[in-house]
Amino acid sequence: MRTGEFTWAFVKCYGDPAADSNDDGNVSLKEAFDWTIVQNPTLDVGGTLVGRMDPQHWVHERLVSVSQKEILPTEYSLEQNYPNPFNPSTTIIYSIPHQGYVTIEVFDVIGSEVSTLIEGELPPGNYKVEFDASNLTSGIYFYRIQALPSGRQAGNSASSSGQGFVETKKMILLR
């Protein structure tokens, strides 16, 4: 399952503490310092400003931005539910690469629909839905996803060729 990627950006300033400190011992940040951008450094406990001395250089790190990029899926997927077997609830994870109409339904072993978990237009993304089967008896159940990109008619057949997606998986409710 693809979730997301965090990016931490720091600005680092390097200088010579002996040459750049003023009378009170503080280090001044001069234009002559070498500034660099550091991506994904290790954070200290506070995760904010960090300054440290080493024998050669004074290093000042300042957190300038934090962003989270969601990694969008490139293909449709329906994962196996977990836990499986389950009692009384389970989680179903699925991915939609294009905005479209999505349904996830649960069926019993003879093909009767017992629940509709998702029905509606969804943007691209990674999703999970909880299925609560506390009102059902033990047994084998099936869950099916049908996804059609926006602009497709619900009556048209769907395939995994970019025109849409249909997949069914089995799960076991064990009391």
Image: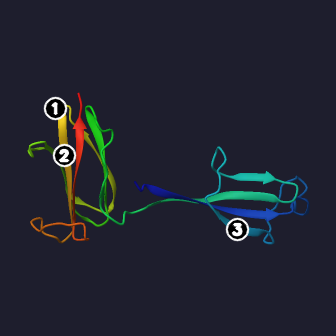
Query: Is residue 80 visible in this depiction of the protein?
Result: yes
Asked whether, in this view, residue 106 is left or right of residue 89, the answer is: left
N-terminal of the pair, mark 1 or mark 3, is: 3
Above or below: residue 19 compared with residue 93: below
Closer mark to the observer between disc 1 and disc 3: 1
Name the residue that disc number 2 marks: 142
Asked whether, in this view, residue 29 is left or right of residue 3, the answer is: right
Q: Residue at x 88, y 55 (%)?
A: 55
Mark 3 Cα-neighbour bin, 10 Å: few <14, some 14–19, many ≥20: few
Q: Separation of disc 2 and disc 3 at Cα?
A: 54 Å
Name the residue that disc number 3 marks: 36
Name the residue that disc number 1 marks: 135
Quarter where residue 22 is shown: bottom right
Nearer the observer, 24 or 55 = 55
Q: Separation of disc 1 and disc 3 at Cα?
A: 60 Å
Instruction: Say which element carries label 1.
Output: loop
Mark 1 residue type: Asn
Quarter where residue 1 is shown: bottom left
What percent of the width, then of the height, locates residue 80?
A: 30, 48
